[in-house]
Image (cartoon, helix red, strand yellow):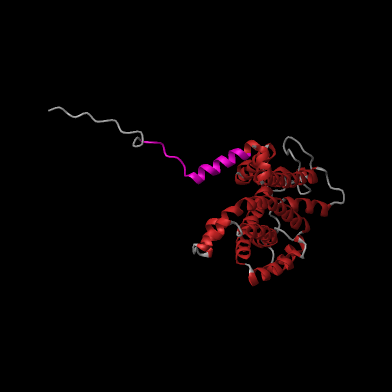
Amino acid sequence: MAVPKQRPLPLQARAQPRRPPRAARGGLTQARRFLRSSLVGTLSIVFLAGLIGVALFTEQLAPYDPLEADYASLGAPPSAAHPLGTDTLGRDVLSRVIHGARVTLLVALTSVVLGDGLGFLWGLVSGYVGGRFDAISQRLLEVFMSFPTLILAMLLLIGLGSGLQTVIIAIAVTRVPLATRVIRAVVLSIKELAYVEAAQSLGARPWRVIARHVAPQCVGPLLVIASFNLGSAVFAEAALSFLGVGVPPPTPTWGSMLGGVLADAFKPPWWLVIFPGLAITATIMAANLLGDALRDFLDPRMKQQVE
């Protein structure tokens, strides 16, 4: 008995490699376009990614214990044994800078996520709901913004007490007003668009309109705000530690390294000031340059020039 020949499957039925969802493909495409359009932004991402890698593998990269004192090498200049020298207690500066990167990034990233996340939600609700809730929210934000950032953070630290968690909370609170104001302004312009009014006229609930039509349009501005706030958070943590009200000792941070050496000597050795200062400056500069690149890329007028 002859076996009937099997017809080949049509092209649509043949096995096709799975592709990522359309949203994921769009996100990857936008990321590639951003990396191609901005050399400065790409270099900033590479630097920040390398810094995160240093923070993750601190134990493997640090040549010495950052708290171990070597009394035979008190205040030694940079050498083969200690590439960045030692401090007044004989502790290796390179190891302290590497360990300080972990603490500084932990405080900065966590505070930005908390502060900008709260500001994002607050701005969405305040801008969309409007009315009395919006008016009260804006007056409350004005009260927060009337205090200088460091003064407000210090007041919160005095009220909450010292510790790593309280430093994160204090810096996160100072990030909220800017994010809330910017997201609220974006929402006020978006909710007047035709497709948002169409969704409202069709009977969509407010939370659904916010989640599907308003919030996605605010992600770009949020990324720009987070980039700028990352640099501000690094500066705030360094300033608080420099003043002695940040992360309590003996945990090494870049700000406490500068504050401790300036408190010990009127004219400290140059390597105890240059290397922690360079770490702070380079991180803040990379975060700010990334924010500039993202702002230019997400601006429709700049995108037309790039294309």
Q: Quadrant of the C terminus?
A: top right
Q: Please, which residue is most extreme toward the right here?
A: 266
User: Count of labels shown?
Assistant: 0
Nearer-the-camera pick, 287 or 299: 299
Q: Is residue 300 left or right of residue 239?
A: left
- Which residue corresponds to the image point at 67% horizontal and 71% vertical from the top-left? 136
x%, y% of residue 79?
76, 36
Quick check: 145 above or below 293? below
Residue 275 is left or right of residue 123, and the answer is right
- In the rendered view, would you say 280 is above or below 111? above
Residue sitting farthest toward the top: 2
The residue depicted at 63 percent of the width and 63 percent of the height is 127
Q: What are the residue bounds of the magenta stretch? A: 15-34
Query: Residue at coordinates 12% horizontally, 28% vertically from top-left?
Result: 1
Image coordinates for residue 117, horizontal then vertical, percent = 61, 58
Residue at the spot x=70%, y=39% of the render?
A: 40
- Residue 205 visible, this orientation: yes
Q: Tell me if residue 82 is in the magenta stretch.
A: no
Is residue 28 a member of the stretch shown in magenta?
yes
Residue in the foreground of this view, choosing between 307 and 178: 307
